[in-house]
Image: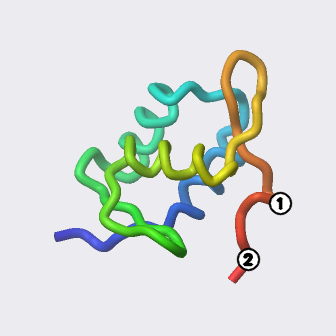
Amino acid sequence: MSESIHGHEVMHMMLELGGSFSKQSLQAAIEAKFGAEARFHTCSAEGMDAAALIDFLQVKGKFVPQGEGFNTEAERICQH
């Protein structure tokens, strides 16, 4: 089994790619970078696939509206 990837890595990827994401385009970008079988964790959850991570980050207020979709902001990535 592959190592779990922290959700911060996905948020940093979003900032690097820039632009606006939909849930579908973000999931495709995550799977392209980390693989379709990748699993993710955060400070308070683990064992999530890409779709579950996207839902989790949305509920936690990590996304900001941008254009027709959303992105994130560096200030929303906890630093620890």
Image coords of residue 24 (percent x, y)? 45, 26
- Cα gap from disc 1 to disc 2, whole angstroms: 9 Å
Image coords of residue 71 (percent x, y)? 70, 38
Of the residues shown, which amino acid type is indicated by label 2?
A: Gln
Residue at left 49%, top 44%? 54
- Name the residue tied to disc 1: 75
- Name the residue tied to disc 2: 79
Return the residue found at the far top. 68
Q: Work out whether residue 33 or residue 41 is closer to the camera in this orientation and state it.
A: 41
Q: Work out whether residue 21 or residue 56 is closer to the camera in this orientation and state it.
A: 56
Q: Work out whether residue 11 or residue 17 is closer to the camera in this orientation and state it.
A: 11
Return the residue found at the far front. 59
Q: In which quarter of the image is residue 78?
A: bottom right
Residue at left 51%, top 35%? 26
Label 2 residue SS:
loop
Q: How crowded is mark 1: few (under 14 residues within 10 Å), some or many (20 or more)?
A: few
Q: Quadrant of residue 67?
A: top right
Colour scheme shown? rainbow
Residue 4's disc number: none
Of the residues shown, which amino acid type is indicated by label 1?
A: Glu
Q: Is residue 11 above or below residue 41?
A: above
